[in-house]
Amino acid sequence: DGFIQNISDERDATKVVFESGATVSAKVDAMVAALTIGMLKKGVNIYMSYTDFRNYIQEQNGTCCANKPVIDAASESIKYFGDSRITLIPVLGLEDAADEAMVASAPDGLVYATDVEGSDRAYRLWFDEKEEKFMFRVLFRAGTAVKMVDEVVLGQVNNL
């Protein structure tokens, strides 16, 4: 079901409700306010959609002043202004989230893994003479998990 569902189902995960119509900057600030000291010691990634990421950069650049540099919109990730332990990262998986979700976790706190489906016939390797290339077919399961549910923050506009 993905990380959002995994985190939603966990009682010990911190959940933040964003106000409807809030700016991306306000949402990021709410996520940062929910981070624990333990999370900050490890470093934290805040994952968001590419749309939210671009809007955040635009909002931050709009409030730019002498003590704050302009952020390059082509950045693949950026540090949260004022705390270099926090990195904002856009991900495609959150682009279509109807509830405008953001997820904060230590870099190794979220796991995506695969497992071959149980038998010795789960994979096959052969040479295709017609195509003149090796072919490989494998059946596997893929899933997500949260390592430390008390060190993850889920922010959503609704559905919490």
Image (cartoon, helix red, strand yellow):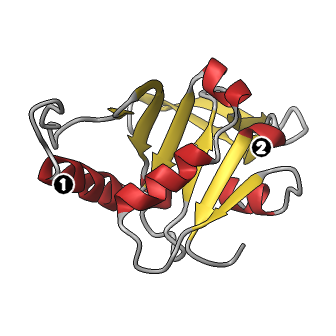
Q: Amino acid at mark 1?
A: Gln
Quick one: label 1, few (<14), some, or many (20+) residues within 10 Å?
some
* Quadrant in which the C terminus is drawn: bottom right
Q: Residue furthest top?
A: 41
Q: Which residue is mark 1?
A: 58
Q: Which residue is mark 2?
A: 145
Helix, strand or loop status at disc 1: helix
Where residue 55 sits in the image (x, y, percent)? Answer: 26, 59
Helix, strand or loop status at disc 2: strand
Residue at image position (60%, 60%) is 155
Q: Amino acid at mark 2?
A: Ala
Asked if residue 131 can be seen in this view, the reply is yes
Q: Say above or below: 96 vs 133.
A: below
Q: Say above or below: 111 vs 101.
A: above
Q: CA distance from mark 2 to mark 1?
A: 33 Å
Q: Nearer the viewer, residue 90 or 151?
A: 151
Q: Nearer the viewer, residue 116 or 91?
A: 91
Residue at image position (59%, 27%) is 107
Upstream in the sequence, badge 2 or badge 1? 1
In this picture, residue 75 sits left or right of residue 143: left
Where residue 60 sits in the image (x, y, percent)? Answer: 22, 49
